[in-house]
Image (cartoon, grey):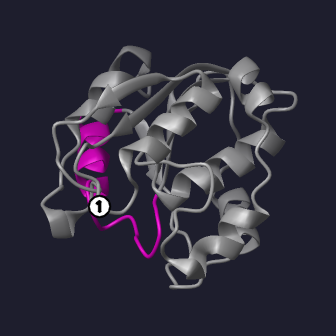
């Protein structure tokens, strides 16, 4: 059975953006998918998110798939840099991701600066790595997502959606994510 874990971004939650859509897709396909609920404050702390991730993720195995969006990509990479020392996972899909400061939203810089990411370990322990970006992303410029893809030696996909993949910009579905995880999904038996 495949377990899919979704890490949302800054000030978001499971009921926003394309997360309800992907939860519905997983339900229809009888796939185990959980969108984590992380602190949605405007001044998030990495350690708070990490504690919440540890509380909500029961276990991971070689069939696990992680999907992360925006600031959630930093949280996921930090989490996996610790958890994957003795464990491999199937796939990591990063949407509108980045590795370091963006030159905007100063309140998230302490979160970003606190992250410790072991890209070499992640390349070894994650079978498939994919970065999805948008040419029209006004929050995370494409160059940042492409830098992240290079750090992970990841497959790069340019999405049809023209924005930051948030509902306020009209993004309530993200078929590129589903298409890229679909080959790895094993339904709940």
Name the residue rendered at 63%, 31% in the picture: 151
Residue 177 is one of the magenta-drawn residues: no
Residue 70's spot in the image, x, y percent?
46, 56
Q: Which residues are magenta?
A: 8-30
Whether residue 177 sits left or right of residue 92 in the image: it is left
Residue 47's spot in the image, x, y percent?
76, 70
Front residue of 144 and 187? 144
Badge 1 marks a residue whose secondary structure is loop
Residue 185's spot in the image, x, y percent?
41, 22
* Residue 1 visible (yes or no): no
> Height in image: 25 above or below 61?
below
Name the residue rendered at 28%, 54% in the picture: 137
Name the residue rendered at 64%, 72% in the picture: 109
For disc 1, the marked residue is 138
* Residue 129 visible (yes or no): yes
- Residue 115, located in which quarter of the rendered image? bottom right
- Residue 80, located in which quarter of the rendered image? top right
Whether residue 90 sits left or right of residue 4 in the image: it is right
């Amino acid at each position: 059975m495949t377990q899919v874990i979704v890490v949302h971004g800054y000030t978001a939650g499971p009921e926003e953006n394309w997360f309800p859509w992907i939860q519905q897709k997983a339900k229809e396909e009888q796939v185990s998918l959980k969108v984590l609920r992380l602190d949605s404050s405007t001044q998030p702390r990495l350690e708070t998110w990490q504690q919440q991730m540890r509380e909500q993720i029961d276990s991971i195995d070689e069939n696990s798939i992680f999907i992360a969006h925006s600031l959630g990509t930093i949280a996921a990479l930090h989490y996996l840099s610790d958890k994957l020392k003795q464990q491999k996972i199937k796939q990591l899909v990063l949407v509108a991701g980045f590795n370091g400061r963006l030159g905007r939203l100063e309140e998230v810089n302490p979160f970003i600066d606190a992250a410790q990411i072991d890209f070499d370990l992640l390349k070894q322990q994650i079978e498939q790595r994919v970065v999805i970006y948008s040419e029209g992303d006004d929050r995370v410029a494409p160059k940042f997502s492409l830098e992240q893809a290079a750090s992970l030696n990841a497959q790069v996909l340019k999405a049809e959606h023209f924005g930051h993949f948030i509902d306020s910009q009209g993004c309530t579905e993200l078929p590129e994510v589903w298409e890229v995880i679909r080959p790895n999904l094993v339904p709940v038996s």
